[in-house]
Amino acid sequence: MTAGVPRITAVDTYDIRFPTSRELDGSDAMNPDPDYSAAYVVLRTDAGDGREGHGFTFTIGRGNDVQVSAIEALRSHVIGRPVDELCADPSSLSSDLSGDSQLRWLGPEKGVMHMAIGAVVNAVWDLAARRAGKPLWQLLADAEPEWLASQVDYRYIADALTPDEALALLKRGRDGAAQRAVRLCATGYPGYTTSPGWLGYSDEKLTRLAGQAVTDGFTQIKLKVGADLQDDIRRCRAARAAVGDGIRIAIDANQRWNVDEAVEWSRALAEFNPYWIEEPTSPDDILGHAAIRQAVAPIKVATGEHVQNRIVFKQLLQAGAIDVLQIDAARVGGVNENLAILLLAAKYGVPVCPHAGGVGLCELVQHLSMFDYVALSGTTDDRVIEYVDHLHEHFVDPVRIVHGHYAAPAAPGFSAQMRQESLDTYRYPGGAFWAADGAAREEKAGA
Amino acid sequence: MTAGVPRITAVDTYDIRFPTSRELDGSDAMNPDPDYSAAYVVLRTDAGDGREGHGFTFTIGRGNDVQVSAIEALRSHVIGRPVDELCADPSSLSSDLSGDSQLRWLGPEKGVMHMAIGAVVNAVWDLAARRAGKPLWQLLADAEPEWLASQVDYRYIADALTPDEALALLKRGRDGAAQRAVRLCATGYPGYTTSPGWLGYSDEKLTRLAGQAVTDGFTQIKLKVGADLQDDIRRCRAARAAVGDGIRIAIDANQRWNVDEAVEWSRALAEFNPYWIEEPTSPDDILGHAAIRQAVAPIKVATGEHVQNRIVFKQLLQAGAIDVLQIDAARVGGVNENLAILLLAAKYGVPVCPHAGGVGLCELVQHLSMFDYVALSGTTDDRVIEYVDHLHEHFVDPVRIVHGHYAAPAAPGFSAQMRQESLDTYRYPGGAFWAADGAAREEKAGA
């Protein structure tokens, strides 16, 4: 080690859980009672500048501790890294983590270990953007195409995207980037809202929130479907009546169906003109999505929030299985792998409409779409970022929605940092909320 | 709870690691220095009959602790279950574990959480077979087709295999089953050996072990390839010279290549007449395997040890992407999901040649192939179980190889139980071996 060079000195983890199941926020056909949670990580340095890197994996409750232990299993790869080198080349860490031959057995590149890698890699990008004094979208949009292309792992996707093709796409993306950055800062990036459509909400609440969404400037809403067809018909009818014909209604089955069921159910809802059917079946079923897409057109097929890595996205594109690609900021291996996925989508000309909601997913993923608009695809046509109106109050730099658009973040970083008070209150099981909750339960049990 | 009904009372976990990296046993192009390990679980009951259920996930070292924590996250689903009901219907637990809506977010059905489910479900089958007084293969082979068909989760595979089709396959499998069981007990199930072919071995050791394999009665060996083409040519030439033309030589790239590289490399080794190329690329790349298979025929394409679940196997079969399907006993969700995979293979007429080796994988997977032979596919033509000659001494009921064949286990259970002395010695980090190892390292560091 060279003395005096600032290094990563700590990888601190937090098991953060919010009791969302008590309000049925987030309820859908597969997830009736989520407790939105985060396996949260902070990278600290000895640079003396007070800057940290924040990242997290989103989970929905049980197992958040397993996710935390997976992040901790990566610690030895991170501690001691020189901060300048790391921030100048996050792919150096990303490839070391994905390539750890022993940890790789636990995936490879999927599930708990891969999401842990994503949390740590995203924390590095958060730190890099803070040090650069830029919001992440701008750091990416300002970067040299050659450098961005070097941040991608082409292993297992080179048959669909070569490094040369990636570079050409990134160079093309520079044309007009400055003007688009100005436009982005002026008008924001279009969003759509899922807040009206949770399965646990009453028809009255759905109708009221759908109407409110239109008033708020959204041009697309989303409803959860898939538990009961007659309920879905009634809810889609109510939503269509509430928003009129000019607003897009997406529907989301959260993987509830087999291939045949997806086709039948989607057709039964076709009269309400759904814009896309999201997660009609298993995220692993590339050929199944292709079959469904053939059968339900002109309803579009969308998936991605549970797609495990760039290799599956590659095949969804190769097979013509999706109309809409839904990246998630915290499921795959972090910004580096999402760069690969955005490049694949650009190559195949498929619009990216990110999954968001959860804990902090809106905060993160907006940066990726904004970069894509400014310096890769160059368009927001048929592109919208999901928006869900909860838990933003726990973030230091929460998203701002203005007339149905995400306002471009201006603060340096990846908008990933949670407020210290929230960490202290919702840390599980010892944080103030859970300690009080446990005491109340014990009292009730004793009464 | 009904008093007096025996229940599961404990789910005990063990982090077991063997220092295999010091001998380069198990070294391949992606895994240069594995420490073969097991996240081990024991189910205990209050039945008072001394019977336990043993299961495990195989890992290769780092992250074994994460795998243990994942098994522990399942504990609350298992404790308190009535033993009779559980053993009469293991799918009741299997579906509860896979269906836990919060834990499902961490997969779904892949990676760390899914392997944890596999370990627990396999432990239930071990317990069920012990209570039935039969080795698992026999319990399965004796079972009613209707009951076996009820043990399969058809979600996401019903487009390829319906419950009726599964039942028909199982009923067909009963024809001649009694005679095949007799034959199995007399001659065993054919194996092949990977022991000669580890990448870290010298040419001399490779040649010697390959010759020994033929002497021992094996009709197929396997070589690791993929690190350096000239080395592979030299090693394949040496192996072919050692075994002659009448012995099949499989080659195994352990996911080292992109699609194009896999095609080029396989063709460069074609002169040595490799029987199959195993794991030529990512286990997630269904379309990639299909492209490789088209290009390298008549070399067969094999994969499966890292295939995450039945949904990916389904697509490999639908896409005509593989000639040989390699189940693994401890990667997917346990016996129940492997039943689904064996049924899919039978439906598509693709031979199953299990992955084994590691820690205890031979012990487990032999039961599945033997069941398949006796009561499902009804044949061992072009079917062989991988055999690797290490770590069997740690098991209470280790595999027995007789003239290149796996002898049918006779002891009740799934052959999953490790010897108590091995658990005590190799428990990490506090077991006798690791404690002494740590002390030796400290002494060396202090010297």
Image: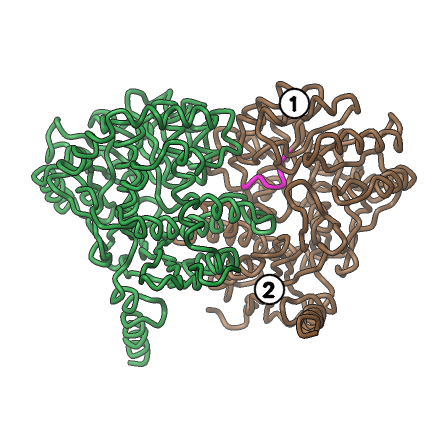
Chain colours: A green, B brown
**Chain to which the residue tagged by mark 2 belongs:** B
- Circles 2 and 1: CB distance less than 8 Å? no
Looking at the image, which residue is at 18% across and 43% down?
A196
Mark 2 and mark 1: Cα distance apart in space: 48 Å
| Magenta-colored span | B303-308
Chief secondary structure of the magenta portion: loop
Between discs 2 and 1, the one toward the N terminus: 2
Point out residue B253 in the picture as x, y percentages from the top left corner.
67, 35
Q: Secondary structure at mark 2?
A: strand
**Residue to which mark 2 is pinned:** B43
Identify which amino acid the numbered label 2 is placed on: Leu
Residue in the foreground of this view, choosing between B380 and A13? A13
Identify which amino acid the numbered label 1 is placed on: Glu
**Residue to which mark 1 is pinned:** B264
To which quarter of the image does residue B289 belong?
A: top right
Q: Nearer the viewer, mark 2 or mark 1?
A: 1
Q: Is residue A367 left or right of residue A341?
A: left
Reply above or below: A108 against A163: below
Residue B306, magenta (yes or no): yes
